Amino acid sequence: MEKGISKTCSRCMEEIQCRVDSIEACACSQIELSTECLEFLKKTNYDCFCNNCLIVVNSLVLRADSIPTKATENVHYYMENGLLVFTELNHIQRGYCCQSNCRHCAYGFEGLDVDFFNRKGR
């Protein structure tokens, strides 16, 4: 089997071999994703995922509908240095990217202007 293009998994940063030129030969094509997960992935800015991350994201997306959306500590957020840190599940349940450069962004957003908050006096 030919090697693909060396890439980094957009979620865990593991090195992977992408076969975008022949998607049927790519390792990711072996993972069966739910329709819900495929729809979710269309809303993200991610490039390629390793198979482990595809499995985890598929599971999170499928579980998101069965978990109440009421903010629950250690499910939707956790506290760190007195601040709320939202979980990946919370972002998936929200249904869109807030583009705030969240630590656990489920949508792959990058590029927050870090001086934006300083200019806004926050």
Image (tube, grey):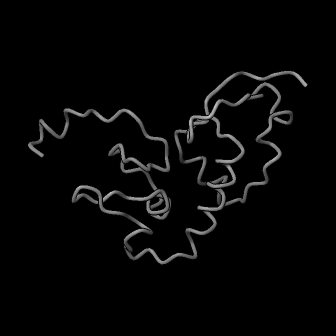
Residue 15: which quarter of the image? Answer: top right
Residue 119 spot, x, y in % from top left: 12, 36
**Side of 91 where 116 appears, left or right:** left
* Res 1 → quadrant: top right
**In this rendering, position of residue 19 left or right of residue 93:** right
Q: Is residue 59 left or right of residue 46?
A: right
Residue 82 in the image: above or below residue 48: below
Residue at the limit of the structure toward the left, as seen here: 121
Q: Residue at x 83, y 46 (%)?
A: 30
Q: Is residue 24 above or below residue 63?
A: above
Q: Nearer the viewer, residue 77 or 18?
A: 77
Residue name at image x 49 percent, y 47 percent: 107
Residue 113 in percent (x, y) is at: 27, 32
Query: How many labels, in total?
Result: 0
- Between residues 19 and 76, which one lies in front from this camera angle? 76
Residue furthest front as drawn: 81
The residue shown at (64%, 47%) is: 53
Residue at point 54% right, 48% down?
Answer: 43
Residue 22 lies, in percent from the top left, at 83, 28
Q: Position of residue 13 (x, y in %)?
A: 57, 35
Give the answer, above or below, for where 113 lies relative to 31.
above
